[in-house]
Amino acid sequence: MEFKYWLILSILGAVWGSAFIFIKIAAPEFGAVGLVQTRLLIASLVFLPVLFTKKYFNLLKPAWKHSLVLAVTNNAIPFTLFSFGSFGADSNILAILNATTAFNTMIIAFLWLGEKVTTKQIFGLILGFIGVIILVNPESSSTSIFSAILCLIGAACYSFSTVFIQKYSNNTDKFVLIGWSIVFSCIIMIPITLLNLPSEIPSSRAILSAIWLGSISTGLAFFGYVYLIEQIGAVKTSTVAYFLPIFGIIWGAVFLNEIITLGIISGCITILIGVFFATSNKKNDIKGEMHAN
């Protein structure tokens, strides 16, 4: 793989890895629901000018139903769950738990699509669960069990969405599919947001964090993601999964002074090794698909 693609993968991993610190900063002031609505609104403003061009608008008709499903399963639900999860977990834990998407995808693909699962992948799955147990162990981190469960469910939603795309939308333009799912989820969240408005105007720090989440992490980063899939394929693009927890830990320590314990390092390494084995079947593009908050 050419150096420029590794560079884009690294940048993408750094940007998506940073999303968790901004969730941690902004969620307490916006509220979990308010933050999701704000980031989806900003991301929609990034996507809409391109989606309304003739080239892409004409591709909406065959994609809108699938985009609507993804609006719920790939955006509204997991974004909200990770935002709520941030109240009881550091940003580095959010990033690491997000990596369980790979394991969930393998399981769902096996149950739904009948994909074969190798012994090596089962070993990876077991390692992944061991890594999660290490992370949520009260002796190694301050993560609440409830927050961990919310993040794991959110990661499972990303996995469902990946398999859904593989089964029903393989021939659909991915930019149109993802772009309109962002717009639809923004609309879907409006009535829920009206019932969960913040009690006071968020600080400039929280507002800037929400702007980054919407415009960069949820907006521009997906342009790079789609570009990589088109240039090097989904399997190689999925290696971004290995960057997210690493950058999540680095950004959390640098910007939020989060403590990196031996338990966090051990859990992260165990999960990443598990991801490596769980995504080792290169015959299937969806095994290693990765999403980010």
Image (cartoon, helix red, strand yellow):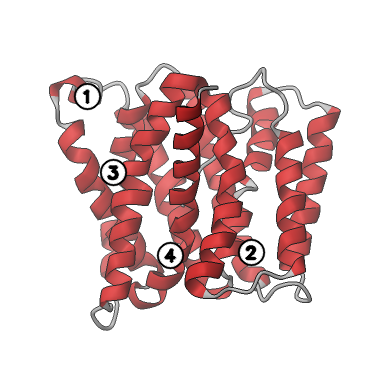
Camera-nearest residue between 99 and 190: 99
Q: What amino acid type should be assigned to the residue bearing mark 2?
A: Ala
CA gap, disc 1 and disc 2: 38 Å
Disc 1 marks a residue whose amino acid type is Tyr
Residue that badge 2 annotates: 148
Q: Amino acid at mark 3?
A: Phe
Q: CA distance from mark 3 to mark 2?
A: 27 Å
Tell me the element at label 3.
helix
Residues under labels 2 and 4: Cα distance? 15 Å
Q: Which mark is residue 56?
A: 1
User: In the visual, does 119 lie left or right of 197?
Assistant: right
- Residue at 25 percent across and 68 percent down: it is 194
The alpha-carbon separation of the residues under discs 1 and 4 comes to 31 Å
Q: Amino acid at mark 4?
A: Ile
Q: Where does label 4 land, which residue? A: 23
Indicate which disc, 1 or 2, sits on the residue closer to the N terminus. 1
Say whether residue 197 is visible.
no
